[in-house]
Image (tube, rainbow, N blue to C red):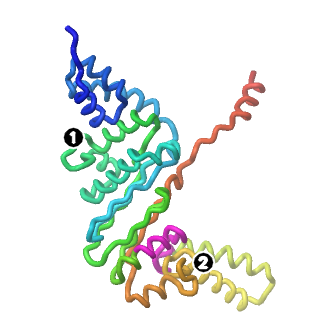
């Protein structure tokens, strides 16, 4: 008996799996038009593709963002792909933003807990399943790497995403939305590591002091002068790594600390995600591989 597969069935299957028309048609033919059975079949088939791709380094990608209308709840999510080309696609960015929204709404403890949640309210697909479907659809390894979630009971949150590659959240008390956005842009550009000098770990300061002292002592100047030089370098170091000590990007005449004082505002915390930071990207050195083979052979 020949089974007719309708265009609507193919459309539904494509929407639910994100896979190509021919793959969906073939699966429906195999399952005699049973959409749910076709989904299972496609997931099994895609599974082998997913496994093959899972070994490849995903060091590109995009930062997804969710921020609530009242700016009291926000999340960033870094989702990695293998190439910039894939990360620029609308489906990829929609997934990254949906992951950020799910992280914001549900407040999972870690990436594994996030993966087990439905991607969107009322979805049958979990974050993990939606990721697998995207891998099958786009043909690259895709990985939900990390997320950050801010909930501000008092104050509000500023956010900024630069070219999909850098994402920032800044939590503020006082100030307004414009200040919050300006500060988020500042963090994107100036890469502070801490909010205030007292947050800089003591061992880090001690290490810097050691380096500066060794350098200053080589100058042959008296101990009192050396001490003064080292003190000046430490002050400079603290202003470079702290948000409050940095010159404000929109007006370098003042520091961010002075800007906040003028606005009667304080920064509680911030986070900055840059796509791929800390991921070792495998670089193929084919010439040396060939040379090793020649020598070995």
Q: Position of residue 6 (x, y in %)?
A: 23, 24
The foreground one among 197 and 65 is 65
Task: Look at mark 1 in the image and give the residue it sits on.
Answer: 124
Query: Which residue is found at the position 47% from the left and 79% from the top?
Result: 196
Query: Which residue is found at the position 35% from the left and 25% from the top?
Result: 23
Q: Position of residue 191 (x, y in %)?
A: 53, 69
Which image quadrant: the N terminus?
top left
Q: Position of residue 31 (x, y in %)?
A: 24, 19
Q: Main secondary structure of the magenta part?
A: helix
Q: Is residue 159 above or below residue 259?
A: above
Q: Is residue 59 left or right of residue 125?
A: right
The answer to whether residue 164 is magenta is no
How far is the residue under mark 2 from the one under mark 1? 51 Å
- Which quadrant of the figure has residue 19? top left
The foreground one among 12 and 280 is 12
Which image quadrant: the C terminus?
top right
Q: Is residue 90 above or below residue 268?
A: above
Element type at mark 1: loop
Which numbered tag is attached to residue 2? Answer: none
Query: Which residue is found at the position 23% from the left and 30% from the top?
Result: 8
Q: Which residues are magenta?
A: 181-201
Which numbered tag is attached to residue 237? Answer: 2
Nearer the N terminus, badge 2 or badge 1?
Answer: 1
């Amino acid at each position: 008996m020949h089974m007719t597969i309708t265009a609507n069935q193919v459309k539904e299957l494509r929407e639910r799996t994100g896979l190509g028309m021919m793959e969906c048609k073939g699966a429906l033919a195999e399952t005699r038009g049973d959409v749910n059975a076709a989904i299972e079949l496609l997931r099994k088939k895609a599974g082998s593709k997913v496994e093959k791709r899972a070994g490849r380094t995903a060091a590109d990608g995009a930062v997804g963002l969710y921020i609530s209308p009242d700016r009291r709840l926000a999340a960033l999510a870094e989702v990695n792909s293998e190439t910039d080309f894939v990360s620029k696609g609308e489906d990829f960015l929609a997934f990254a933003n949906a992951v950020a929204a799910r992280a914001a709404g549900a407040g999972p403890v870690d990436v594994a807990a996030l993966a087990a949640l439905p991607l969107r309210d009322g979805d049958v697909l979990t974050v993990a399943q939606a990721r697998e479907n995207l891998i099958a659809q786009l043909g690259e390894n895709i990985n939900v790497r990390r997320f950050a979630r801010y909930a501000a009971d008092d104050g509000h949150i500023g956010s900024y995403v630069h070219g999909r590659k850098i994402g920032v959240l800044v939590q503020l008390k006082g100030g307004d939305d414009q200040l919050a956005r300006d500060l988020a842009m500042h963090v994107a550009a100036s890469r502070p590591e801490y909010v205030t000098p007292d947050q800089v770990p003591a061992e880090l300061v001690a290490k810097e002091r050691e380096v500066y002292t060794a350098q200053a002592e080589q100058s042959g100047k008296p101990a009192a002068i050396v001490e003064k030089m080292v003190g000046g370098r430490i002050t400079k170091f603290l202003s470079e790594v702290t948000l409050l000590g940095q010159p404000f990007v929109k007006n370098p005449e003042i520091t961010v600390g002075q800007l906040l004082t003028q606005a009667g505002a304080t920064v509680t915390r911030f986070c900055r995600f840059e796509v791929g930071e800390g991921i070792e990207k495998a670089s193929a050195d084919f010439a040396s591989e060939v040379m090793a083979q020649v020598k070995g052979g």
